[in-house]
Image: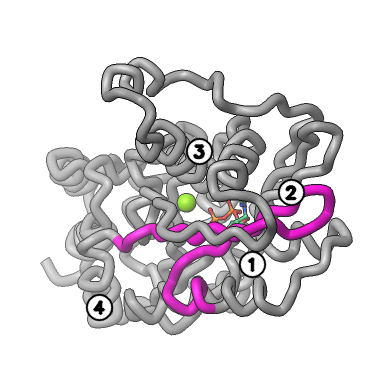
């Protein structure tokens, strides 16, 4: 392709909200064999919502939710935000004693949250802190078991049921006893399945990579039509997944939105950041999909194929 053709293609991309950082990236995209999708915020809407909260202790529901929300309040994770939102809603809107005015004026308040000390986020696991001198853990089963908290069978069964319906189960422990479980759902983007089908028709193999657990990942993969799943991948491990697909010389694209995804976006031959994603991801990528629409993954590959095709 001539420099003019590259310039034209870059312009066409920009008009469609596909920002291409340079001719090399544009050229590599035509040869993409694998497209690795991050799950949360990329294939899914990234709008996690708590759908279930089950207490497995003597605590009442309000107490349980306040405790868990207090622990999660310092976390930036989308799951944490969903939990705090759910608890806030319970606290202010299921309380019959409050007038609507009182509810609204309390909306942004954090006065209902408990004091937390020694908060820390554990990547790919969840969070850890102390409330009233007792250790509080909120996260996946690995977080609990690695911290020496045992998971009762009925809790495990409940989590498995959530995961089989494509939800993420978040476990909470207080003083090293499991006190309850939250189920969080994050719906697929509406175009996700069609885009996956389109890629397969183009001869491109879709893959899903996530820090989430195997069962949830497989349920989501099934819904979207992806067979190749890499789950329970630590944030630093996503780049290794990209490299494993590059081993035989294959050209690999990675599509992601999060801070977690930036090493993988940089490692990929073609890194595509979702425009609504974090700045760090956008910086690490070769392409920025400004419309936050997965159809632009196909647009990007098409554009490259058309620009560099030998048939003109
Ligand atoms: P993803 O690739 O899906 O963005 P992350 O590495 O951010 O995954 O998280 C992986 C898993 O770790 C989550 O599915 C969840 O089980 C757990 N986790 C991480 N952060 C939190 C948190 N703040 N609260 C509860 N669970 C968390
Ligand atoms: Mg993500």
Q: Secondary structure at mark 2?
A: strand
Q: CA distance from mark 1 to mark 3?
A: 24 Å
Q: Is residue 251 visible?
A: no
Indicate which disc, 3 or 2, sits on the residue closer to the N terminus: 3
Q: Which residue is mark 2?
A: 137
Q: Assign the C terminus to one quadrant of the image.
A: bottom left
Q: Secondary structure at mark 3?
A: helix
2 or 4: mark nearer the eye:
2
Q: Which residue is mark 1?
A: 232
Q: CA distance from mark 2 to mark 1?
A: 19 Å
Q: Is residue 164 magenta?
A: yes
Marks 2 and 4 in Cβ contact (< 8 Å): no
| Relative horizontal placement of residue 201, taking residue 148 as reference (left or right) | left
4 or 3: mark nearer the eye:
3
Residue located 13% across and 39% down the image:
15
Residue located 26% across and 40% down the image:
290
1 or 3: mark nearer the eye:
3
Indicate which disc, 2 or 4, sits on the residue closer to the N terminus: 2
Ligand 1 within 8 A of label 1's CB?
yes
Q: Is residue 288 visible?
A: yes
Q: CA distance from mark 4 to mark 3?
A: 36 Å
Q: CA distance from mark 4 to mark 1?
A: 25 Å
Q: Is residue 204 above or below residue 267?
A: below
Q: Secondary structure at mark 1?
A: loop
Please identify the quarter of the rendering in which residue 147 is found.
bottom right
Q: Secondary structure at mark 4?
A: helix
Q: Residues within 10 Å of mark 2 (few under 14, many from 20)?
A: many
Q: Which residue is mark 3?
A: 84
Residue located 46% across and 58% down the image:
184
Residue located 43% across and 46% down the image:
257
């Amino acid at each position: 392709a001539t420099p003019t053709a590259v310039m034209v293609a870059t312009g066409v991309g920009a008009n469609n909200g596909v920002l291409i950082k340079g001719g090399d990236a544009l050229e590599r995209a035509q040869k993409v064999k694998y497209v690795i999708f991050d799950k949360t915020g990329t294939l899914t809407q990234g709008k996690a919502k708590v759908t279930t909260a089950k207490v497995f202790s003597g605590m009442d529901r309000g107490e349980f939710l306040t405790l868990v929300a207090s622990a999660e309040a310092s976390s930036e994770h989308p799951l944490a935000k969903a939990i705090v939102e759910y608890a806030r809603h319970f606290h202010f809107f299921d309380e019959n004693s409050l007038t609507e005015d009182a509810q609204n004026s309390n909306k942004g308040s954090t006065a209902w949250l408990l004091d937390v000390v020694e908060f820390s986020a554990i990547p790919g696991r969840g969070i850890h802190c102390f409330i009233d001198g007792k250790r509080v853990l909120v996260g996946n089963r690995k977080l609990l078991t690695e911290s020496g908290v045992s998971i009762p069978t009925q809790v495990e069964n409940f989590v498995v049921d959530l995961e089989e319906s494509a939800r993420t189960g978040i476990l909470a422990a207080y003083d090293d006893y499991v006190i309850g479980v939250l189920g969080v759902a994050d719906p697929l983007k509406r175009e996700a399945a069609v885009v996956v089908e389109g890629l397969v028709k183009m001869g491109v193999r879709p893959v899903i990579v996530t820090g989430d657990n195997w069962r949830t990942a497989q349920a989501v993969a099934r819904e979207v039509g992806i067979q190749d799943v890499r789950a329970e991948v630590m944030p630093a491990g996503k780049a290794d997944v990209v490299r494993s697909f590059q081993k035989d010389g294959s050209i690999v694209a990675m599509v992601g939105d999060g801070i977690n995804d930036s090493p993988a976006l940089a490692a990929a031959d073609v890194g595509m950041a979702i425009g609504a994603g974090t700045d760090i991801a956008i910086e690490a990528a070769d392409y920025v999909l400004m419309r936050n629409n997965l159809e632009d993954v196909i647009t990007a590959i098409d554009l490259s194929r058309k620009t560099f095709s030998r048939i003109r």
